[in-house]
Image (cartoon, coloured by chain):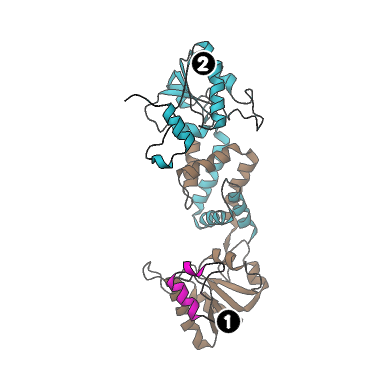
Chain colours: A brown, B cyan
Amino acid sequence: MNEPLERLVNAFRSLPGVGLKTAQRYAYFIIKSSKGDATDFANSVLLAKEQIKYCKECGNYTDKTICPICQNRNKKTICVVAEPKDVVVMEKVKNYNGVYHILNGTLSPLENRGPNDIRIKELLDRINRYQTTEVIMATNPDVEGDATAMYIAKLLKPLGIKVTRIAQGISMGTDLEFADEITLSKALEGRREI
Amino acid sequence: MNEPLERLVNAFRSLPGVGLKTAQRYAYFIIKSSKGDATDFANSVLLAKEQIKYCKECGNYTDKTICPICQNRNKKTICVVAEPKDVVVMEKVKNYNGVYHILNGTLSPLENRGPNDIRIKELLDRINRYQTTEVIMATNPDVEGDATAMYIAKLLKPLGIKVTRIAQGISMGTDLEFADEITLSKALEGRREI
């Protein structure tokens, strides 16, 4: 293989989950595309890296100082997530009108991440400033996500703030027989009168 | 989502086989990577598009006028393939010392590609110039690949050139019971004394 092609293949291989064959496929696609398209592609990488920074409020990616969500929405409710990508997922729920707070990770003794390594101090500061009344913990339903939610709940409850956790249970459309025990037990625990 | 991020996600979505989730994953990876890495990535795209052209001989991608394979190897044997990416695959066979010829497609009545739309004239020209003695047809073992191989074989045989086709049969490690009928019939057809 020649040098610029090899370099391009290696660039694509650095992307998460991309192996040699996929990288070659992407590279050949770029080479076959028009000069304008390839330039646009490269520019969108440069532009994103240049212009995207962290929102000073919630910590999400934005090209402004304060992201549009923090600028325009109700700060009485803060939904706490681990990563910026979780905001994209949560935003699919159209009727949430509060803001977000990105922790940039979860508490993890194994990976040596303690309370000072994630954005908890910033969360407390925002709650104070905006007199937030409810904090929704939307970290992942796994050991680290649950531990992080519990830790923050313990911190906030003495301040008289309502802390909630997104519900865990059977996913829509899942057959009962395929649900795992932990999910089933969570679903039972969280049962409601109908 | 903000504008530069959206643009980057859309750029990645234009790659073959990449959906929204994968594109987002790639985009977040770029944003999280260092400025130098992102710039390298963008530059490798620009550089490849700028420097890679077609080898004047075989039609493969190269950053030279004549690719290293055409420059250095025996031109008495030409292995004919449909696409540049097939050369990468064939080159895994370490003991092939001939050159390649990229057709840039196969004959396809359905897609309106006739003999003048693929690089057959260039192949004849090279065979003439280098007094090639064997042409190995390594187009894909499908209807179009087979038809293209047959067409070229018919063209070359009157010139006294040996035309061969890569063998079709059971793949290494495949259980007989999972082989399809056509493959089995090809395997039987191509049987050899042992």
Residue farthest to the left, as pictured: B194
> Can you give x and y, in whole percent of width and height, for residue A108 in the image?
40, 70
Label number found at residue A134: 1
Q: Residues within 10 Å of mark 1 (few under 14, many from 20)?
A: some
Amino acid identity at mark 2: Ile
Residue B53 visible, this orientation: no
Residue at position x 52%, y 47% in the image: B41
With respect to residue B111, does A45 lie above or below?
Answer: below
Amino acid identity at mark 1: Glu
The chain under label 2 reads B
* Total number of numbered discs in the rendering: 2
Label number found at residue B177: none
Disc 2 target residue:
B127
Q: Nearer the viewer, residue A115 or A194?
A: A194
With respect to residue A140, does B94 lie above or below?
Answer: above
Residue at position x 49%, y 79% in the image: A188
> Can you give x and y, in whole percent of width and height, for residue A99 in the image?
61, 73
User: In the rendered view of the protein, which quadrant contains the N terminus of chain B?
Assistant: bottom right
Q: Do the residues labelled 2 and 1 touch (CB within 8 Å)?
A: no
The chain under label 1 reads A
Q: Give the range drawn in magenta.
A: A167-194
> Can you give x and y, in whole percent of width and height, for residue B162 in the image?
46, 16
Q: How crowded is mark 2: few (under 14 residues within 10 Å), some or many (20 or more)?
A: many
Secondary structure category for the residue under label 2? helix
With respect to residue A61, does B88 lie above or below?
Answer: above
